[in-house]
Amino acid sequence: MTKKIELPKSYAPKDYEDALYRQWEKSGFFNPDKLPGRRPDSYCIVMPPPNVTGVLHIGHAVMLAIEDLLIRFERLRGKKTLWLPGTDHAAIATQNKVEKLLWEKEKKTRHALGREKFLARVKNFAQESHDTIVTQVKKMGSSCDWSREAYTLDAPRVQAVAEAFRRLHEMGLIYRGQRVVNWCPHCQSTLSDDEVAYRPAKEKLYWIKYGPFVLATARPETKLGDTAVAVHPQDQRYKKYVGRRFKIPGVLGEFEVVVVADGVVDREFGSGMIKVTPAHDFTDFEIAARHGVPMRQVIGEDGRMMANTGKYAGLTTAEARAAIVRDMEKMGLIEKIEEYEHNLSVCYRCGTTIEPLPKLQWFIAVNKPFTFRQSARSPIKDIGDGEKITLKELMSHVVKTGQIQIIPDRFVKTYFHWIDNLRDWNISRQIWFGHRIPVWHHDTCQMLGIMDTMHQPDTWMRDAYVILDKPLDEYADDEIVYCGKCKNGYTIKKIKEGHFTQDPDTLDTWFSSGLWTFSTLGWPAEMADFKNYHPTAVLETGYDILFFWVARMILMSLALIGEIPFKTVYLHGLVRDEQGRKMSKSLGNVIDPLAVAAKYGTDAVRLSLVLGTTPGNDTRLSEEKIAGFRNFTNKLWNIGRFVLSQTSISKFQIPNSKTLPDRWILSRLSEVTERVTRHLENYEFSAAGEILRDFTWGDFADWYLEISKVQKQSSPALAKNTDLILRHTLAVLLKLWHPFMPYVTEVLWRELQGKEGGLLLVASWPAPGAREARAEQAMKNWQETVAAIRNLRAEYKVPPEREVEAEIVSAPAGLSEELAWLEKLSRSKISAVKKAEKKGQAAALAGSMEIYVDLAGAVDRGRESARLQKERESLESYLAALEAKLKNNDFLKRAPSAVVEKEKEKAAAARDKLARIRRELTSLGADG
RNA sequence: GGGCGCGUAGCUCAGUUGGUUAGAGCGUUACGUUGACAUCGUAAAGGUCAGAGGUUCGACUCCUCUCGCGCCCACCA
């Protein structure tokens, strides 16, 4: 016998959460190596690393809730589970943040501070931000293994990045090239295509006289960099000009262009002819490349006109545009100006208009075949080791063949579409914070390249370097490296003496996060973790970074280790406010997950983010919703409180002798266990949670708990058995709920099991027991009986304290055994009769039973008959529909026989019920 | 310009291979403090599943079109 336990009346999360988390952490069970029992199967999720730019937001909370749910589920199922946490240095985002702070507080730019000092500031900021985030991740109850925590910019990851760069370069996938890139004049950096956002803007379209032609342009200032004119190859109007050169009068005098024919030109837009500015437009750059047209850069990295633009030099592009238009008008070169709307390319971080510029950059080639190397233990299906293939082909292959599954699957299409449009990935960034590109340029060759500007400097310069994949002082002085251009060997000593200069650029932040699934597991070293956990099981993240991140991880993993990074991608939706707007600080509609967790409990917040949501769809969150789930955690708490305070045995066995309600609740529990398990396996978290909630609140609390009160008063033996069922059901429920709401379940588990019971965290997932269909059906009838009596009571406003008398006609066998609880729950005195004896009773139907409730003269006959007539009508139309269906030969002939049978049964039941209602009505009429 | 998603009860959303008299929570209404829980209980009202066609014995579910909302991608200068 254990002593009865007293718990507070309502659940106060803050009294338990922190202590429990510490207890979990201390137990060591977050670390898969310390989990108890034999665990042959590994299961690993690497956490999408939050940026060290600030604090945790509600999006992180969704990510943590779902991943912790998966991890706890699989841990309970006996897998060796690793959830590997970490943070992301988020290069541009973090640098911008610190630059902004620096400017606000000290009115200094990063250049005023200098690279080293500035980086020290960023490092401090990142550290503080990291510490906050870790505390917050813990607050959410995340059961991740902190002993393996990683950071995208810590020493092991720096090593992995350098190694990855060197290997990809060796494979011929990384190259240096002169290309027009997205340049943000504010961030002073290039951006990848995905970092460009679009903003609709009203702009002017200038129709200009262009030598013998007229054409339309939105950017007259780029005329200074024009080197060609392009038309559509099939355009009859201009065919005769193709290949010819023309002198074009301009604001700085005449210049020469060549007319080329290219398919990208739209004959319908403008005059069907475009001016080509290879240095400042992506399309133009490609046209120029296809036709060997020279390039002339006129806009600099500061977003201003360069020295070669005469009197316009130094003006911003906007100023230059105004000035040039004015000058052209004077020269009579402007034909007309139209208004039109189009999408302006802007920096997704700061909103500044993008300037396309030519720059020497590092790229990853996605369309270049390379020699694919398979992983020995987890090879990619249907691809041979050593096969020549492009990254694009590989990336679509693994998704097309289902080796990587994306949930929800509609994103597969989006993924393919993205791949189809993918261009070489620009990985250089002209910012300071991040992974420095591990390349040292050979100064002599660089000089020769620059002197050779008349030719193509980039082809010369792009090979003039060595790659050093570790810090300079880790090399021996006499080690020799070779310049890729002059092919001469140089000692490290020479490099130290300053004959080489390190590339000033850093890598795109997605380069390092692309390695995340394996750089966190020890790669490039062949560590046990890497062998045990790669490929990882699931990558869970928001659909908004499918391209940025998910696709990059697939790319890196395939190229570098010949494996998929994860088997399943689960994409959650974005959390919006109750009006469906994005949460943002400026709108003031953000819900801070930690604030609401403090107010309503972490479990409630987690439930509100998981239930009522579907993958890939945005959800609306309100405090009311969270409060609703707080109510539920309290409900569970009180269920636990009741069981704990009412039961006085500590055993967990199911008794041999069981009542109908006992058999019913166990059967239902089996069904729930089975369905919840299946839904969780299928990533249907919401469905699993709803089934559990309905069972917990409905079947268990509303019915079984109430029935148990009656059973416990019946006999000592029955009371003991009831206790066993109560404790068993609660124990199973706590396990099933644990992945959703770890805290309250762990507290109740401790109270239920005592110290010897161990932590719920590492308990075992329940296996469904046997189902008892007959018990479920019988119970359903009795529940309907209770509901029918309650219904009539409510209808006639019988005060709750008053007991009524009820007669049941054609009650099935077994009524006497259930009588006690039926009477208690319906607050009635029930007797079985052959035929209703008393007058003035209200009637209802439950299953095959007819129930009469004596309302002691309170029955309003008119109302009673109106009620029955209403029921009759709906039943009649229902039956009519069924009968029509059953008369339909096509239905009988074509529908599966099981369906036909089912419809027949329904019709029979309806007919029976209808007959009885009609009887009621006549008796009601006869009485009057 | 392409592509995707959404439109189901007043609100937020479920609805798993087409076969229920279409469900839940919140809200509303009525009654209620019966020793776990008022962060609660019992019961009720509330939907021509955006609209129009089509396929089918049968459509919330599949197809086509229309309307409304949202998102993503794109080299119309």
Image (cartoon, coloured by chain):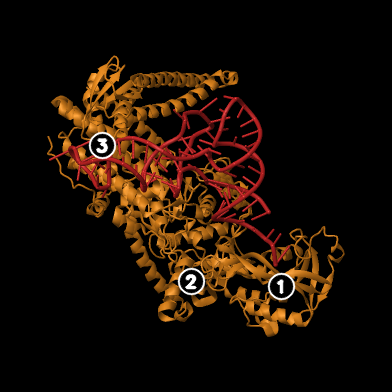
Determine the image quadrant of residue A674. Answer: top left
Work out whether disc 3 and disc 1 sit on a shared chain: yes
Q: Nearer the viewer, residue A927 or A379?
A: A927
Q: Is residue A185 left or right of residue A455?
A: left
Looking at the rendered structure, whether the residues under marks 1 and 2 are on a common chain is answered as yes
Q: Foreground mark, 3 or 2?
A: 3
Does dot 3 land on a helix, a strand or a loop? helix
Mark 1 nearby-residue class (10 Å; few <14, some 14–19, many ≥20): few
Which label belongs to residue A432?
2
At x 42% / y 77%, what residue is drawn? A104
Q: To which quarter of the image does residue A583 belong?
A: bottom left
Question: Residue A870: horizontal and vertical position, in percent?
Answer: 42, 29
- Quadrant of the drawing holding the N terminus of chain A: top left
Give the amino acid type for the residue marked by disc 1 in the picture: His
Q: How far separated are the C-alphas under marks 3 and 1?
A: 78 Å
Q: Which mark is residue A731?
A: 3
Q: Residues at marks 3 and 2, common chain?
A: yes
Chain identifier for the red-coloured part of the image: B
Q: Is residue A422 above or below residue A720?
A: below
- Disc 1 target residue: A455
